[in-house]
Amino acid sequence: MEDNPRLRRLRFRAWHRGTKEADLMVGGFFNRYGTGWDEAEIAWFELFLEEQDVDIMAWGLGTQPVPAQFEGPMMDAFRKLDFIQIEP
């Protein structure tokens, strides 16, 4: 990933959302899965990052319906939330 500027930029954007909760959710998702993504998955994530944190978090927690453009295996993985690691 270090030699891929696109993935480095996505990692930065994923971890600098504006709130710690969104950073953990979106950044944790990128850390867990990002290095294995193909072109279509990277494009999905780029669009996903354009959304508001409050919406992204609501989709992840299941408190808002997920828009059709984000439904699928990537959102299924995101909604598991098993990638979040909170350190003391």
Image (cartoon, rainbow, N blue to C red):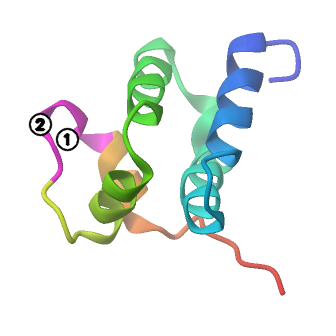
Tell me if residue 35 can be seen.
no
| Residue at image location 62% in from the left, 52% down from the top | 18
Image quadrant where residue 4 sits: top right
Q: Amino acid at mark 2?
A: Ala
Q: Within 10 angstroms of label 1, few (less than 14), some, or many (20 or more) residues?
A: few
Q: Position of residue 3 (x, y in %)?
A: 87, 13
| Residue at image location 65% in from the left, 34% down from the top | 13
Q: Position of residue 52 (x, y in %)?
A: 38, 45
Examine the structure image and report whether residue 67 is included in the region drawn in magenta. Answer: yes
Q: Nearer the viewer, residue 79 or 36?
A: 79
| Residue at image location 80% in from the left, 80% down from the top | 87
With respect to residue 28, does 40 lie above or below? above
Query: In the structure shown, which secondary structural element does the residue marked by tag 1 occupy?
Result: loop
Q: Position of residue 80 (x, y in %)?
A: 40, 66
| Residue at image location 23% in from the left, 69% down from the top | 62
The furthest residue to the front: 18
Examine the structure image and report whether residue 27 is included in the region drawn in magenta. Answer: no
Q: Report the residue marked by disc 2.
A: 68
Query: In the structure shown, which secondary structural element does the residue marked by tag 2 occupy?
Result: helix
**Res. 71 mark:** 1
Residues marked 1 and 2 touching at CB (< 8 Å): yes
> For the magenta stretch, what is the residue range?
66-73
Q: Quadrant of the C terminus?
A: bottom right
Q: Spatial distance from mark 1 to mark 2, Cα to Cα?
A: 5 Å
2 relative position to 35: left or right? right
